[in-house]
Amino acid sequence: MNAPTTVIPAKAGIAEGLAAAPFRPEVPAFAGTTDTLALYIHWPFCVSKCPYCDFNSHVRETVDQEQWRDALLADLAHEARETPGRRLGSIFFGGGTPSLMPPATVAALIEAAEAHWGFAPDIEITLEANPSSVEAARFADLAAAGVNRVSLGVQSLDDEALQFLGRAHDVDEALMALGTAQSVFERVSFDLIYALPGQSAETWRAELERALSFGTSHLSLYQLTIEPGTRFAAMAARGELSPADPDESAALYELTQELTGAAGLPAYEISNHARPGQESRHNLAYWRYQSYAGVGPGAHGRRNRLATQRHRKPENWLAALARNGHGIAEAREIPASERGVEALLMGLRLAEGVPLIPERLEMDAVERLAAQGLLALAADRLRVTQPGMLLLDAILTEIVK
């Protein structure tokens, strides 16, 4: 193959820690040596299941909040026993819909995490939230609990698109929640999904320019992908939904880079944009291949050179916790060679790239793709260029041994 085929960037499974890092890997850590640990806490419940979502989320008529607080605290305590001597650099409440958690539960988990590990002085504590008026009413209490960064699932600034995406809020409600969040939290990010069927460049330009006008320091901008097992996948199989044309999606991606760069929020990762210094430190821990503990149903982690995964189904996770004192379904040691490959796969998503490690790379392919302008090759560092990011999956297939 002389050149990669087009691959459009899509939402990474960060919310469930699907690309986390082993504890003190033998391969070089991309951010250098660090004594801090990232902690992911998964809340698995949603009011409804969005048709594009393949995350570990579940709809239940009722949730025993006291039972779930105690269970998460117990799972947290197990992870703390397995990772002694570390401080937390970040906590991320993902889901599901963590803003459905009672603020008292969030406060209890943050307090317990500090007691178990201790906090770095500038710890980042993020919570994912839906921009509904009900959940926005909890923002002040969540901030008082210790949350200092919120990530809002706005997803679109067009009411018709929100209906298509199965969202429960409309644009006005989302903007009210955004305003509340900006008045309460130190840092605010929000998500948008683009490259929807039939979406034009003019429509996306207007929507993104409006999004940039709100002044947040971080945006996550994902192209719609049809994931197996979702309602959209079933619709596509029946011919009821046609994904956006790949060339048109590529043009929208390039427009996105142009507008965000001009606004001072360049891409620091394939789908994430921030003002310098406002990047998500928690997600950078994944992409820079640093240490990560995950608790709650379906959560993944990497520690002590082990890859851990919790039981996905809430009821199975609770049963395992009662039986074993933790919710782990699988823990396996990752070979050094696999850790090296994981580090490259994650690090090359970043605009900063990775240290150049020739023994991990097909150097002939690296040099050829660099000559085509898809990679930037320096004496000690390798990164994917902006045009190359459109082809990232194919590039990784060619260059990683």
Image: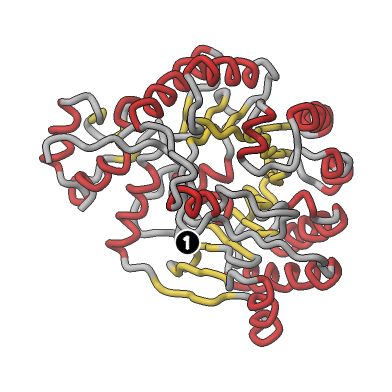
Instruction: Indicate whether 275 appears above or below 34.
Output: above
In the drawing, does residue 65 fall left or right of residue 386? right
The structure residue drawn at horizontal position 27% and vertical position 62%, both measured from the top left corner, is 337
Quick one: label 1, few (<14), some, or many (20+) residues within 10 Å? many
Q: Nearer the viewer, residue 92 or 226?
A: 226
In the rendering, at what x and y percent does residue 231 appear?
A: 55, 53
Instruction: Indicate whether 242 appears above or below 92.
Output: above
In the rendering, at what x and y percent does residue 151 appear?
A: 68, 39
In the drawing, does residue 75 fall left or right of residue 376? right
Instruction: Give the residue type that dot 1 points to.
Output: Phe
Instruction: Indicate whether 212 appears above or below 289.
Output: above
In the rendering, at what x and y percent does residue 343 appear?
A: 36, 51
Identify the image quadrant of the N terminus: top left
The structure residue drawn at horizontal position 55% and vertical position 24%, both measured from the top left corner, is 276
- What is the count of numbered marks? 1
Q: Nearer the viewer, residue 71 or 237?
A: 237
Rendering quarter of residue 274: top right
Colour option used: secondary structure
In the rendering, at what x and y percent does residue 49 appear?
A: 65, 54
Instruction: Indicate whether 239 appears above or below 302.
Output: above
The structure residue drawn at horizontal position 86% and vertical position 69%, both measured from the top left corner, is 66
Q: Which SS class for mark 1? A: loop
Rendering quarter of residue 296: bottom right
Q: Nearer the viewer, residue 397 or 140?
A: 397
Task: Identify the residue position indicated by label 1 in the image.
Answer: 23
In the drawing, does residue 119 fall left or right of residue 199? right
Q: Residue furthest front?
A: 239
In the drawing, does residue 355 fall left or right of residue 221? left
